[in-house]
Image (cartoon, rainbow, N blue to C red):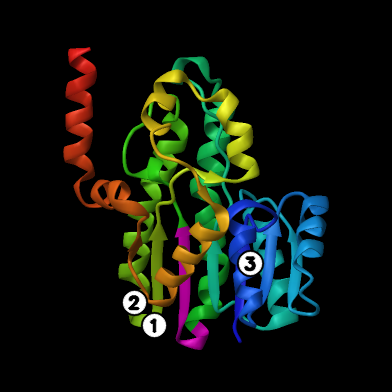
Amino acid sequence: MRHVLVTGGSSGIGLAIARLLLARGDRVSLLARDAQRLADAAASLSPGENVLTLTADVTDAQAVDAAVSEAATRFGPVEALVASAGIVEPALFLDQDTAAFDRQVAVNLTGVANSVRAVLPGMRGQGRGRVLIVSSGAGLIGIPGYSAYCAAKFALRGLAAALRAETAPDGICVSICFPPDTLTPQLARELPLRPPQAQALMGRVKPREAADVARTILAGMDRGRREIHFGLTLHLLGYFGPFAASYLDLRRGRR
């Protein structure tokens, strides 16, 4: 049994991961902004004494620190982090206001950094730990209408690589995953806003069930995999992304 903190744990991939963790006996702290959604998530899990809900915005470093301290008081130091909190608001770059762009970068990038910073001291004190960062397929290739989201999700790959180099001597394993479109409440909100240019690229791949994505993530995390990909297309993008991007840019230019 270990103590796992899941940010963005009130719905979607985060909630699906929490359900799997509880099923195998782990203690889970769920962190999200909306107290009511957190309460509904906890009720759907029926986990008894093994779940704690924490209300905090991941962009607020002090609030995240306080939430992690509360979680440690209840379950002991966090032994694994699943940084799943994220938002997406599709719009073409010049059509999106600055506040919406900045908010996506703050949640999807700075929010992950705040979460990792809050748990690392406890992991270092134990001499072990696991960090799983949830990026996206949009962190592997540029997508029209997703400039803010792509910028943040691309940056997570660099963050994971730097953290891995820094924390390996402390016995801490850092993984990052790149899920495709996944059937979540966020996707339902996103699709009506998705520009047709993006849908032409992304709509070719059928969205996956959140439970399937969660199983793949946990399996990769347990094995200590550096990067976790989904399906042949995203595997190829993970390893040959710059070449694929050049090919797509060439095709767009010809059109």
Give the labeled residue for mark 1: 171
Which residue sits at x=65%, y=68%? 19
* Residue 101: percent from left, percent from top: 52, 29
Ranked by sequence position, the earlier of labels 2 and 3 is 3
In the displayed structure, 49 sits above or below 39; it is below
Q: Quadrant of the N terminus?
A: bottom right
* Residue 36: percent from left, percent from top: 83, 51
* Region in magenta: 125-133
Tell me, yes or no, whether the highlighted magenta stretch contains residue 61: no
- The crowding category of the residue bearing disc 1, from other C-alpha atoms within 10 Å (few below 14, some 14 to 19, many at least 20), is some
In the displayed structure, 47 sits above or below 44; it is below
Give the labeled residue for mark 2: 168
Mark 3 residue element? helix
Q: Quadrant of the C terminus?
A: top left
- Single out the mark in the foreground, 2 or 3: 3
Label 2 is placed on what type of residue? Answer: Ala
Question: Label 3 to label 1, Cα distance in Å?
Answer: 24 Å
Mark 1 residue element? loop
- Residue 18, numbered circle: 3
In the displayed structure, 207 sits above or below 219; it is above
Determine whether, in the image, residue 123 is placed left or right of residue 70.
Answer: left
Ranked by sequence position, the earlier of labels 3 and 1 is 3
In the displayed structure, 37 sits above or below 119; it is above
Q: Are marks 1 and 2 in contact (CB under 8 Å)?
A: yes
Question: Label 2 to label 3, Cα distance in Å?
Answer: 25 Å
- Residue 87, numbered circle: none
- The crowding category of the residue bearing disc 3, from other C-alpha atoms within 10 Å (few below 14, some 14 to 19, many at least 20), is many
* Residue 110: percent from left, percent from top: 51, 49
Label 1 is placed on what type of residue? Answer: Gly
